[in-house]
Image (spheres, rainbow, N blue to C red):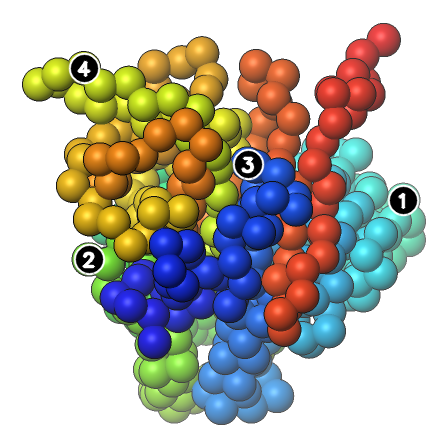
Amino acid sequence: MNDGLIADNLSVKGSGLQFCGQDVAALAKEYGTPLYLMDEDCIRARCRTYREAVKRAFGERGRVLYASKAAAFLHMFRIMQEEGLSVDVVSCGELYTAYKAGFPMENVWFHSSNKTDADIAFGMDLGVGCFIVDNTDELESIDRIAAERQFRQDILLRITPGIDPHTFDAVATGKVDSKFGFGIETGAAEAVTARALELPHVRLVGFHCHVGSQVFDSDVFLRSADILFSYMDRIRAVYGYVADRLDLGGGYGVRYVVSDPALDLAANIAEVGARVKALCERYAYPQPEISFEPGRSIVADAGLTVYTVGTVKRIPDVVNYVSVDGGMTDNIRYALYGASYTVLPASRMDEPAEMNCTVVGRCCESGDIIQPNVLLPESTRRGDLLAVCTTGAYHYSMASNYNRLPRPPIVMLRGGTSTVAVRRETLDDLLRCDA
Ligand SMILES: *Cc1c(COP(=O)(O)O)cnc(C)c1O
């Protein structure tokens, strides 16, 4: 039972918060704060949910790629390999991390809206499975760089279906005005498809689309599938080209606060499966390999950030600030898009939470806010622990060293044990690149 807490991996014992059945205060004592904790059992369970749902829906012609930008470090790639997922990378840094983790390169797909020639060459030299091409400059570069290496590079083209996913603007990517991909409405998609089919050193294996993030039902996936199948049907009619793969992107949402809906991943993927089957029948199209690229929905609610309170500043009739020992350096999402969070008084779980406050970080920016309008116990004071839930995705991966703050460690919790997956940065680490 989770005492009404936001996730199953949270519970309360006495005054203390427990995560994965382990005492948060004891973990904070052992590893220090700020601290990223990750529930490895939860990550693995989510991988299996995806794999099984995709297998039920598409049989052997289905694939799950973990969008590693959500959280990329060696241990995470090893988990993905063990769980049989493929991965997406968007940079040489993510690619190199996957490579060093021993991840099979043919199951790595290389995204990004602006790959340099060096990125492309590095990807080819490591042998990535395919590139997802986002613009024509890149397409020509891939053809040329593959020609120098005398081979033919598999590619997908990123198509913009022109759908508004009704999410934060900063994470909506499938509208016609998007910086990502080739629009169908504008004719860009067809023009680049024709070009890709002419180039001797690329092999067009199919199409990709990704409409946005933090979406709570399958509507955008269904509409994307409708639009992409209609597009593929037209391309087959004009060019005789049949796509072997269709990647529907990522974006399934997670609950950051109790008012966010809970999503049944398996049921949603089954719905997409039924639609793809119907579309294949309607267009008499051989079923392409269908892939999903979840990031957030695999790792977000596996994460919990633990902070120590440094001070409480009460400005009567105005606001109470509770200041913690991290901030926008380890969690930039409120500053970036006003994201919502559940914040728990990890060492005062048995007290009524009646003090309205703004939880702020320690950086020299007024915008360094973790969350406004948080209810914490009146007795909150220096030395208390606070926990911010659902921080497994886009936290460590967006972390910075602003104010020369060292980044927190990532500690993986699994079956009652804890291990460091990423150690805490030291002050000397901060000087590593200084000449
Ligand atoms: C970010 C991204 C994803 C993952 O999105 P989530 O919301 O984390 O599931 C998948 N595909 C592409 C192309 C992306 O840019």
Q: Earlier in the sequence, mark 4 or mark 3?
A: 3
Q: Earlier in the sequence, mark 1 or mark 3?
A: 3
| Residue 314 seen in render | yes
What element does badge 1 sit on?
A: helix
What is the residue that sits farthest to the left in this orientation? 317
Q: Taking 84 as reference, is 99 above or below it? A: above
C-alpha distance separating marks 1 and 3: 48 Å
Q: Earlier in the sequence, mark 2 or mark 3?
A: 3
C-alpha distance separating marks 4 and 1: 66 Å
Q: Which label lies toward us, 4 or 3?
A: 4
Q: Earlier in the sequence, mark 4 or mark 1?
A: 1
What element does badge 3 sit on?
A: loop
Q: Which residue is mark 4?
A: 315
Compared across the picture, whether 407 is left or right of 103 comes to: left
C-alpha distance separating marks 4 and 3: 26 Å
Q: Which residue is mark 2?
A: 259
Q: Position of residue 309 (x, y in %)?
A: 42, 30
Q: Position of residue 266 (x, y in %)?
A: 40, 81
Q: Taking 17 as reference, is 121 above or below it? A: above
Q: Taking 313 as reference, is 10 above or below it? A: below
Q: Is mark 1 within 8 Å of ligand 1?
A: no
Compared across the picture, whether 29 is left or right of 376 comes to: right
Q: Taking 220 as reference, is 386 above or below it? A: above
Look at label 4 and name its amino acid. Answer: Ile
Q: Earlier in the sequence, mark 2 or mark 4?
A: 2
Q: Which label lies toward us, 2 or 1?
A: 2
Q: Which residue is mark 1?
A: 148
| Circle 2/circle 3 CB separation < 8 Å | no
Q: Which residue is mark 3?
A: 34
Q: Which label lies toward us, 1 or 3?
A: 3
